[in-house]
Image (cartoon, helix red, strand yellow):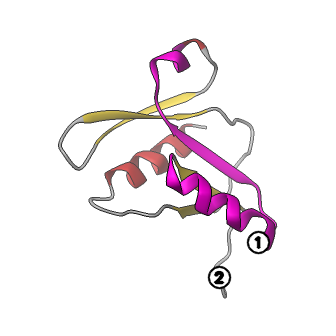
Amino acid sequence: FGTISFDVLTTIEARGFILGGMLVDPVQRPLITIRKHKKSFEALPGYKQTYTNWQGEKENLYLFESNFGPANALFIDDILETGTSLQGAVDLLAQE
């Protein structure tokens, strides 16, 4: 990653989990996983963020982690179409 400075890796479900998981050991940074919201998450502690997907539909992202404090995050994902899920993930991390 050259001169890029970051404290944590962050990835969005689903294939991003694979890519992020492969990088945890080489970069020696913690991994924060952001899930696509499921109804079963409603009863669990965490943070939810709504965004509009590439098809114009509302979706939610969910973050279980807490107390990781201010951090520079490097986002890992395999697809970038409109950037709305990435912006949703940034907004989600800002809630914490």
* Residue found 68% across the figure and 36% down from its top: 65
Of mark 1 and mark 2, the one earlier in the sequence is 2
* Residue found 52% across the figure and 16% down from its top: 40
Q: Depth check: give the residue in front, 23 or 2.
A: 23
State the extent of the magenta-drawn residues as a range.
14-42
Label 1 is placed on what type of residue? Val
Q: Secondary structure at mark 1?
A: helix
Q: Is residue 69 left or right of residue 38?
A: right
**Which of the 4 quarters of the picture holds residue 18?**
bottom right
Residue 9 placement (x, y as % from top left): 65, 60
Dot 2 crowding, Cα within 10 Å, few <14, some 14–19, many 20+ = few
Which residue has dot 1 on it? 27
Q: Depth check: give the residue in front, 87 or 36.
A: 36
Quarter the C terminus occupies: top right
Quarter the N terminus occupies: bottom right
Q: Secondary structure at mark 2?
A: loop
Cα gap from disc 1 to disc 2, whole angstroms: 9 Å
Q: Depth check: give the residue in front, 37 or 84.
A: 37
Q: Is residue 71 left or right of residue 60?
A: right
* Residue found 54% across the figure and 63% down from its top: 76
Taking 31 as reference, is 29 above or below it? below
Label 2 is placed on what type of residue? Phe
Q: Are discs 1 and 2 less than 8 Å apart at CB?
A: yes
* Residue found 59% across the figure and 52% down from its top: 17
Which residue has dot 2 on it? 1
Q: Is residue 73 magenta?
A: no
Residue 63 placement (x, y as % from top left): 58, 35
Residue 26 placement (x, y as % from top left): 78, 73
Disc on res. 56: none
Q: Is residue 21 magenta?
A: yes
**Which of the 4 quarters of the picture holds residue 47?**
top right
Taking 62 as reference, is 15 above or below it? below
